[in-house]
């Protein structure tokens, strides 16, 4: 997290991950328990690329009526500058059903990405097989997630440590250059295209928010910011983020949002249980942002202790093949 000596928890946290994300280990139970204990009264679960854990999250939410739940997903899209992470907030059951082609595309992308990464590393003469990838995934991912998603790519933290252990690389600094070299041998699939994903999401009334934008915005390059706004047509900006938006940039982004009629959101982007307990809600997003966010969410998108109808069983056709 960014070091803020007087950092308080906000009452909302709109960017959180569970073990249904390929690189996360926290459970929905741990998120809700930490939110309840820390006074965070509104949370969004935004797993990478999938909605497979939302049914489970709704069931957990019923035990924590003091914490409102906003179903979401973090969908990475391919656009003119490359990959951009978009936090999508307010996934109702009707939206999830209408967006079934997206979930299928992201499941397929995850499996293909993992397979081509393995093949690329092998093309460099290193012994990294699909069986190794499966062992790594099983070392930290619950069986129920693999049953639904199949063999995805491996979280960087786990994969990097294994590469060092096997002698593929000498240090963490060698990890990204190795991945780049592997991609030159066996190209990996791009993320689903922004013009395929985002218009479909917006048609369902779901809010699209560009996540942790510092790198995408080249810090605070107004020309770049406006270019991405025109291309991606997002509804808001994650102006406050626990690690990737510095305190001096938060008001800069918020001012730009106000000028363009966009919402400002905040999230801690937590993945692991220890971090969740310590840092949920710690993103420096002020309380006055919440009413505008709430007003812009689709009707029925906020659950207050009720088990919603969210059902990920329609993804059964995407199970490992």
Image (cartoon, rainbow, N blue to C red):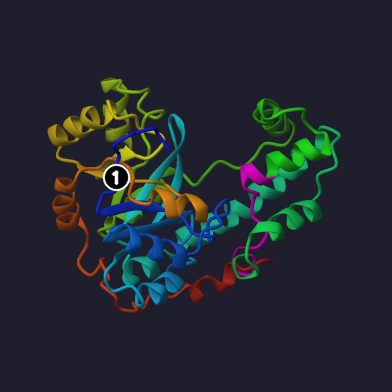
**Quarter of the image where the C terminus is located:** bottom right
Total labels drawn = 1
Residue 305, by quadrant, is bottom left
Which stretch is magenta?
A: 146-158
Q: Nearer the viewer, residue 78 or 91?
A: 91
When the figure is inspected, residue 180 is found, relative to residue 33, above or below; the finding is above
Is label 1 in a helix, a strand or a loop? strand
Q: Nearer the viewer, residue 99 or 261?
A: 261
Which residue is drawn at the image coordinates 34% and 79% (left, top)? 307
The single residue placed furthest to the front in the displayed view is 5
Is 63 colored magenta in this rendering? no
The spot of residue 163 in percent (x, y) is 76, 38
Q: Nearer the viewer, residue 209 or 240?
A: 240
Which residue is drawn at the image coordinates 62% and 68% (left, top)? 319
Which residue is drawn at the image coordinates 47% and 49% (left, top)? 275
When the figure is inspected, residue 32 is found, relative to residue 153, above or below; the finding is below
The spot of residue 123 in percent (x, y) is 81, 36
Classify mark 1: residues with Cα within 10 Å, few (<14), some (14-19) or many (20+).
Answer: many
Q: Does residue 281 appear in the picture of this structure?
A: yes
Q: Nearer the viewer, residue 1 or 101?
A: 1
Q: Which residue is mark 1?
A: 266
Q: Does residue 233 appear in the picture of this structure?
A: no
Horizontally, is 116 left or right of 272 in the view?
right
Which residue is drawn at the image coordinates 58% and 71% (left, top)? 317
The spot of residue 97 in percent (x, y) is 39, 70
**Quarter of the image where the N terminus is located:** top left
């Amino acid at each position: 997290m960014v070091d803020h000596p007087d950092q308080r928890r906000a009452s909302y946290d709109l960017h959180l991950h569970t073990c249904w994300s390929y690189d996360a280990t926290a459970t929905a139970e741990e998120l809700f328990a930490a939110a309840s204990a820390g006074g965070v009264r509104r949370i969004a679960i935004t797993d990478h690329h999938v909605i497979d854990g939302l049914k489970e999250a709704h069931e957990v939410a019923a035990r924590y009526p003091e914490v409102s739940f906003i179903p979401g997903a973090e969908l990475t899209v391919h656009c003119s500058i490359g990959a951009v992470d978009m936090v999508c907030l307010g996934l109702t059951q009707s939206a999830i059903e209408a967006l079934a082609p997206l979930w299928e595309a992201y499941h397929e992308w995850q499996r293909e990405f993992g397979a081509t990464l393995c093949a690329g590393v092998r093309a460099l003469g290193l012994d990294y097989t699909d069986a190794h990838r499966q062992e790594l995934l099983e070392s930290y991912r619950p069986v129920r997630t693999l049953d639904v998603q199949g063999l995805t790519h491996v979280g960087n933290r786990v994969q990097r440590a294994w590469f060092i252990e096997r002698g593929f690389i000498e240090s963490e600094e060698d990890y990204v250059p190795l991945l780049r070299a592997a991609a030159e041998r066996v190209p990996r699939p791009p993320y689903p295209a922004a013009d395929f994903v985002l218009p479909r999401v917006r048609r369902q009334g779901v809010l699209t928010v560009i996540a942790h934008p510092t790198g995408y915005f080249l810090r605070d390059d107004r020309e770049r910011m406006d270019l991405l706004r025109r291309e991606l047509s997002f509804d808001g900006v994650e102006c406050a983020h626990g690690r990737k938006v510095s305190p001096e940039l938060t008001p800069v982004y918020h001012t730009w949002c106000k000028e363009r009629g966009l919402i400002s959101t905040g999230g801690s982007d937590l993945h692991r249980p220890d971090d969740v307990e310590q840092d949920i809600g710690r993103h420096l997003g002020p309380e006055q942002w919440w009413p505008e966010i709430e007003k812009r969410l689709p009707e029925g998108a906020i659950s207050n202790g009720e088990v919603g109808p969210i059902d990920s069983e329609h993804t059964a056709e995407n199970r490992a093949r």
